[in-house]
Amino acid sequence: MIIDCHGHYTTAPKALETWRNRQIAAIGDPAQTPKASELKISDDELSESIAANQLKFMHERGADLTIFSPRASFMAHHIGDFAVSSTWAAICNELIHRVSQLFPENFIGAAMLPQSPGVDPKTCIPELDRCVKEHGFVAINLNPDPSGGHWTSPPLTDRHWWPIYEKMVEYDIPAMVHVSTSCNPCFHTTGAHYINADTTALMQFIQGDLFKDFPTLRFVIPHGGGAGPYHWGRYRGLAQELKKPLLKEHLLRNVFFDTCVYHQPGIDLLTNVIPVDNILFASEMIGAVRGIDPETGHHYDDTKRYIEAAKNLTPDQRRKVYEGNARRVYPRLDRTLKAQGR
Amino acid sequence: MIIDCHGHYTTAPKALETWRNRQIAAIGDPAQTPKASELKISDDELSESIAANQLKFMHERGADLTIFSPRASFMAHHIGDFAVSSTWAAICNELIHRVSQLFPENFIGAAMLPQSPGVDPKTCIPELDRCVKEHGFVAINLNPDPSGGHWTSPPLTDRHWWPIYEKMVEYDIPAMVHVSTSCNPCFHTTGAHYINADTTALMQFIQGDLFKDFPTLRFVIPHGGGAGPYHWGRYRGLAQELKKPLLKEHLLRNVFFDTCVYHQPGIDLLTNVIPVDNILFASEMIGAVRGIDPETGHHYDDTKRYIEAAKNLTPDQRRKVYEGNARRVYPRLDRTLKAQGR
């Protein structure tokens, strides 16, 4: 089985965006705020938006199951206050849940949280609870910078984030570290802010001792770990300067990297440098980079091709990247799959 | 000849730091501000601080000449106002000039600019002029984020920066894009802020059309181009989405990467992905990562070992990385070398 641990619902029916635009327009004029119930998307519309897009590519490329979450760039936690984020997150997660009900063999949910800059993360717990307990979600996306490129929250190693971590431990779910749209003109959203956030989170984990306090906490750093693997010598050396244990002990029991790296040399480096147990297959397809690479004739985000061609991987190791590691890092996914007889 | 295009004076005599601390302590109490003339460092002290450190390693590792600039993390443009930065930059550049006079075959200057958050970059021109015309410097370091991790300046493609660019074109000097200390607790200075700044600058250049307006402007992105080469497929794909020309035309006539990547797989990727004409040898030694890699028994920042071992490079290509490219990207360096009969 091939599990893609990083997919967003980037192809939701237009009605979702229209509703969101109304919600944003009503900030400062609450009487205009649309009700959640005013958003009408039928099962047929949902099915179509998936079947013609993600599911089609999954069939063509050969992926079986996607861990699916709301569109990352639309989370936009910087917009409005907690109430705005709360309603928006509930709507987006609900759609993911419906997709996973419509295609139970192909999609399983990961939650967006109703984060809001300057607001205590514990306010996210009710939505997190609902997504895990009622919707059967197997993970969350955690935004280390709900300000959208101004980086006003404390580092991920700060106690600020502990209410979320306590829930992650209780439910045994991992978090993917994933920012949203940048509203800082210095940072292109998918070209700078996403990758910088990955690199930043990695270094925060190296600098801190979070996993002493939470030995079972697990994070997936997307986009191949940002700059991490390319600069692995730098990070090993910085950990050494900081008198930390080897990264194998200090970091790699708790931190995993996905394979959203859109060319063969990048995947070759990732699979060369990072232990195979820490690499999870992912494509983030129909995402940031949707085009066809003129150098290969294939979609940039068809990452399975790179994994297939990666000379560093044996067939057994490839199975870990495709399936085994995801079942270990997302135990609730493993349980759901087993209940389905898979 | 082997030219290291990225060295900072990280080993200056203690008196420099003491003077700076007095300057910082006097902010808000100008009567206490020390005079530049109160800083006394003898030629012997300067010589010693270099001979026992950078020069020793250059001899041991086999580099001939370093393009040398003030310590990056000490630039700290976020501290004080323009007057504070101005005095500090002049002092630091003066020391670099003296080092280059003491060791004219081994060091040549690159200027730190007296940037200050919110201040028009054209205020940096007098110091830039002095460094080029009086000190014979061959390049500048340009900080895209003088706020120190808050990213409050416009992107490097904004007209805000044009006064600097006009001077760079006039003098035919490149800029290394280099931030300084992060005062944002999210960003570890050398583990996140430096690398993020590289990635950010790269994406700004891709997003903009700066080199249409300045076809001869040249930037060196240090630390191997941040996350750029590892995610080269992503950047090619994003350029394509933005309807830009191929990166070869859009970026690589004007943007170059150094080799400050502290392990073999990183250098292998860099030399595989980036055309050899765009790669400049550098170590940034006695910098962020000073330790010995237990996996190799050698210093992490002894990057010449990786270049020597890089299977992608022919001897001719290696000579370009070591010397030819630097002479092309830094024409004033080439002229100085030729005047020395080298």
Image (cartoon, coloured by chain):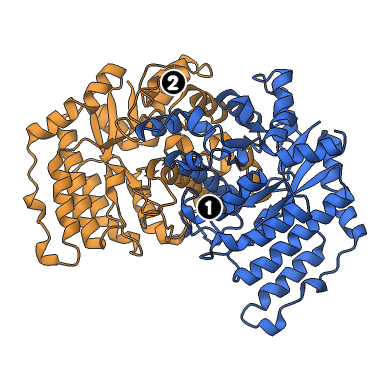
Chain colours: A orange, B blue
Dot 2: element = helix
Q: Which mark is residue B338?
A: none
B112 or B308: nearer the viewer: B112
Q: Position of residue B216 (x, y in %)?
A: 58, 38
Is residue B286 shown to the viewer in this render? no
Instruction: Answer left or right for A114 relative to B64.
Output: left
Q: Is residue B117 left or right of residue A32?
A: right
The residue nearer to you, when weighing B34 against B169, is: B169
Kindly identify the residue that appears in the image at 75 percent across and 31 percent down: B323
Provide the residue designation for mark 2.
A307
Q: Are marks 2 and 1 in contact (CB under 8 Å)?
A: no
* Residue A322 locus on image (x, y percent): 39, 24
Asked whether A257 or A183 is in front, the reply is A183
Is disc 1 placed on a helix, strand or loop?
A: helix
The amino acid type of the residue labelled 2 equals Ile
Question: Is A177 situated left or right of B4 in this image?
Answer: left
- Three-letter code, disc 1: Trp
Q: Position of residue A63 (x, y in %)?
A: 30, 22
Where is B132 relative to A251, above or below? below
Query: Which quadrant is the C terminus of chain B positioned in?
Result: top right
